[in-house]
Amino acid sequence: MTNTSGNPVIQTAGLTKIFRDFWGHQKVIAVDQLDLEVFPHEVFGLLGPNGSGKSTTIKMLLGLLFTSKGWAKVLGENPGDVKTNARIGYLPEESYLYPFLNARETLDFYGRLFGLTRHQRKQRTDSLLDMVGLGAVSRRPIGEFSKGMTRRIGLAQALINDPDLLILDEPTSGMDPIGTRQIKDLIRELGQRGKSVLLCSHLMADVEDVCDRICILYGGKVQSQGQVSELLKRSEITQINCNRLSKQAIEKIEGVIKQECPNSSIEVLNPQDRLEDYFLRTVEIAQAAAIATSGATMGAGASDFLTSGVTQTDDAGTVIEQLLGDTQKTADKKAAQLEATKRIEVEKVEKADLGRREVIDSLIKTTEPVGPLKSKKDDDRTSPAVPLEPVNPVPSPGAVDHSVIDGLLSNDPTKKKTNEKSSHNKDQDPSS
């Protein structure tokens, strides 16, 4: 079921497009009073014969054409908004790609347009090429691709920016049954992962398999719109499926039906597989036998990075729990970072203190008492066998330092006068 509780991803009211001639006269009404609503997580099919206004509607939603009347909103903004377009993936009906670039270079080019980093471009390119089954031919120029292979790489470029809204115009055109089934499975999975998809296609079987709701246009006007399951239901017919019955049981059932509905026609048939399913089983057997091929292969499922949004099975409680869990994880991470920063600061301080202590210890160990310098003659008179004592040894703890006492006594005024007189006599003595 479609989730219609959120705001519409696409909303139009009275949307009209009138093409005029050179003189301004009305030439054709391509879209006439179109009212649409596409909701989140929904795959919406826009159907109609050629010239019914499907492509014109898409171009107005992308801002490629101006509207004549009415209005449209895409992701809550006016069509053509730059930031809004960055959230849209678009696959046109004809893929206009550079033929001289190979598949890998093409995806890298579009990744640069969306401002992706080098690591993101490489990761998404590898993932998308495997997803669309072109990993083995990623180095071949696009000009050598078949139409189906070109559609595959076109779908990959529409997903390179991980869009919230995906607009696909004839996505399975020219594809083989393998690619068709793969694209349908991918579209269903993208809807389950929270993407919104607007699909235009002339292949009714494809639309029936993947779309939640459809809108059928004719002459630019809406002719029918609603849930696929409701629109296709045949309430006037009853169908019963069971295991194989015997002939006698079938005859009894036919008799009961005739009594209940005398004018009803009865048809007993054995169910048949769809040709698409039979074809895919045959190809899977060939691939399991490792038969070589130079074309596309069955790709992997949707890439892991295409996970934005919440699936429609998630309720409000689950979302709140997820948000609370993320908040708690963030708080725990910040606390751990703060604790690591404190530990680093403490280690720095301890290391600095240890360095200072080592410097002080080394200075204390290398410091030795130094006496007055002695001349070389004194060294010659001294026998090397006898250890030399310092001239002014450092007194041991508790010993009396006589040099201090002598200094104090030199300040005695009587002794000072005696010393001055002795010095005066020496100056007068010529023999001195």
Image (spheres, rainbow, N blue to C red):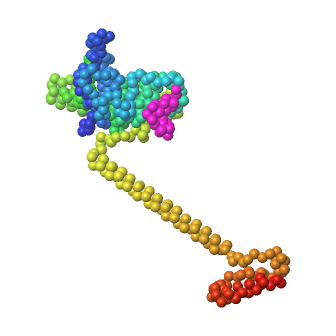
Magenta span: helix, strand or loop, mainly?
helix
Q: Quadrant of the N terminus?
A: top left
- Total marks in image: 0
Residue 131, compared with residue 15, is above or below; it is below
**Residue 241 position by quadrant:** top left
Q: Residue at x 39, y 56 (%)?
A: 332
Residues drawn in magenta: 101-127
Q: Position of residue 255 (x, y in %)?
A: 18, 29
Q: Position of residue 202 (x, y in %)?
A: 34, 22
Q: Look at the image and tell me whether residue 232 can be seen.
A: no
Q: Position of residue 245 (x, y in %)?
A: 28, 33
Q: Quadrant of the C terminus?
A: bottom right
Q: Judge whether residue 109 is colored magenta.
A: yes
Residue 230, compared with residue 359, is above or below; it is above
Judging depth in this view, the residue of 432 and 290 nearest the camera is: 432
Judging depth in this view, the residue of 81 and 106 nearest the camera is: 81
Q: Residue at x 68, y 76 (%)?
A: 368
Residue 423, compared with residue 313, is above or below; it is below
Residue 325, compared with residue 249, is above or below; it is below
Q: Residue at x 70, y 88 (%)?
A: 418
Q: Farthest residue toward the front?
A: 428
Q: Is residue 39 left or right of residue 169?
A: left
Q: Is residue 45 left or right of residue 236?
A: right
